[in-house]
Image (spheres, rainbow, N blue to C red):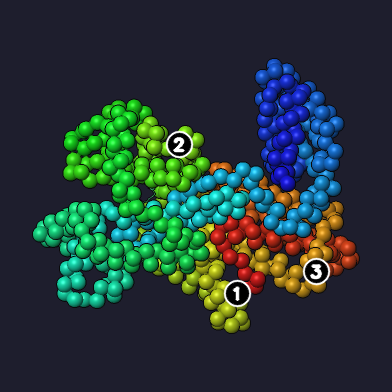
Amino acid sequence: METLKKTLNQLVGSCLTEISGIADCNANVITASKPEFGDYQANGVMAIAKQLQTNPRQLAAQLVEKIEARDEKLIDHIEIAGPGFINIHLSNQALLLRADIVQRDSQLLIPATPEAKTIVIDYSSPNLAKEMHVGHLRGTIIGDCLARVLERQGHHIVRQNHVGDWGTQFGMLIAYMREVMQDNEDLPTQLADLETFYRAAKQRFDSDPAFAEIARRSVVKLQGGDADHLAVWKQFIEQSLQHCHAVYEKLNVTLRREDLKAESFYNNELEGIVKALDAASLLSVSDGARCVFLPEFSGKDGDPLPVIIQKSDGGYLYATTDLAAIQYRSHTLNADRSLYVVDARQSLHFQQVFAVARAAGLSSENISLEHIAYGTMMCSDGRPFKTRSGDTIKLMDLLDESVSRAFDLVSEKNPDVDKSSRRAIAEKVGIAAVKYAELSKNRTSDYIFDWSSMLSFEGNTAPYLMYAYARIRSILRKQELAIDKYQITSLNEAEERSLLIKVLQLAEIVEMVADDCFPNLLCNYLYELAVAFMRFYESCPILKADQALRDSRLSLAALSAESLQQGLDLLGIQTLEQM
Ligand code: ARG
């Protein structure tokens, strides 16, 4: 079943093509911006009239006639407004038919894509030298939501956790580990707090030139494959990955160990990348380093900007690894789309490596390379989010704090619920609040982290949506109507009708998120759905209605709960039956 929007776009578009003689007319159907404009509006007439140099209202009148002759059931009536807008009112019969279909098989609320693609999603990808901190939150959560959305549509998703595990910092860490091990101190205990360990190593590096020299030699040894250095490095990476996966588990993020494709994985490919760039005559030497200069990238002074591929000492760079990763994703994984959910501050890096990869033929012709950029998390005072002393905040600490705040909140609301149930509720609400706060903002803007708004039971928040869901479930629990008897039969009240239309629109929103990768659209939708439910619940009595009407309204409530639950699941938020 196509979405309402797509069906209308096809219907109106083909009618427009027929009357105008212009191929593939875009009907430009959108959800009506106001209820008085109907359910959907088609805005495509004006552009076509302009092309034909004809009066748009006349064209609109012709179009309406054509649509009415063609459409049998979907549309109840159409109005022409303003300079040639087409306002479409759907028929209740068509809405009920669709309701019936999704009620029988709720998987159809989000239909499978007719064209399954292979989509690589690079997300989270922390640097393993330190523990995950708040800067990793957005990418991890947004990436996971996109993976869930695209997977749900039936695409083949390949998650890639492109962790940093190979840079110069590891020389310092290995050197420090070897020193600590000599003193026979218990290494696992030391590594339990990676942040402290990193700081101690850094201090040693900064204050002792002899140690700094050992550290520099350690990187060379590591990258040259020295067995002893590799063994120490592996121990460190293992500890760090365990930290990451503890965070993923707590966050209900779907990244698994098998999704790991660390920078070091591409090590043996880097030489080949240099050769390929050379063969494509893209390399030049600048200050001893091998670089690619592309005419489309220049600095403020107009000088061409280099992409550095290999330093004068032979070392490779972040960009080199990314070129190898593009080759792998394109030619080995055969990706149709490759998404990079990474901080907006790396925009230039991605523009450059995408362009170099294309120029050198490292990527296939049709692969779509997309940087899904996101802004920085800020404090309410407009500065980057840090502890009072200016340190970065560990992600695990932030999540623990959210759960503990949620516990206080839940306890305040439900003092008589037993403690362990309140804890279980708080665990879900606390995590959901943090995730939803991130996902509900436009990802490209910086975003202000604020405990009180994310943990509020009012407004566009996770607690509000989870509460709305639990509320519907509790209504349904009190009723005896069997699931297989669910059928919506009444759309006489405006609130019933708009709630059902909202429910049916989940499919369109998911398509938009899949195309443009903005999870905030799904959040806004779910909030509007919950609001539409509350309005329905306030104005359409369920229990007091006669049997047939009561059953219809219960069925509508059940379908609303289903949509909410499926939508929240795509955000990686688990619902609760009771709150
Ligand atoms: N490790 C990098 C960082 O912490 C992010 C990696 C993103 N993915 C990529 N293919 N470059 O900034």
The structure residue drawn at horizontal position 57% and vertical position 49%, both measured from the top left corner, is 155
Q: Amino acid at mark 1?
A: Lys
Disc 2 within 8 angstroms of ligand 1 (CB): no
Q: Earlier in the sequence, mark 3 or mark 1?
A: 1
Mark 2–mark 3 distance (CA, rounded to whole Å): 53 Å
Q: Nearer the viewer, mark 3 or mark 1?
A: 3
Q: Cβ–Cβ below 8 Å for labels 3 and 1?
A: no
From this viewpoint, is residue 543 visible?
A: yes
Q: Which mark is residue 317?
A: none
Q: Which residue carries the number 2 mark?
A: 364
Q: Amino acid at mark 3?
A: Ala
Q: Which mark is residue 482?
A: 3
The structure residue drawn at horizontal position 80% and vertical position 49%, both measured from the top left corner, is 95
Q: Residue furthest top?
A: 53
Quadrant assignment, res 204 = bottom left
The structure residue drawn at horizontal position 24% and vertical position 65%, both measured from the top left corner, is 232
Q: Nearer the viewer, mark 2 or mark 3?
A: 2
In this view, 538 is above or below 14: below
The structure residue drawn at horizontal position 44% and vertical position 42%, both measured from the top left corner, is 331
From this viewpoint, is residue 300 visible?
A: no
Q: Nearer the viewer, mark 2 or mark 1?
A: 2
Numbered disc 1: secondary structure: helix
Numbered disc 3: secondary structure: loop
Q: Which residue carries the number 1 mark?
A: 413
In this view, 15 is above or below 374: above
Mark 3–mark 1 distance (CA, rounded to whole Å): 32 Å
Q: Earlier in the sequence, mark 2 or mark 3?
A: 2
Q: Amino acid at mark 2?
A: Ser
Relative depth, front residue between 217 and 554: 217
Percent coordinates x, y for residue 3 in the rendering = 71, 45
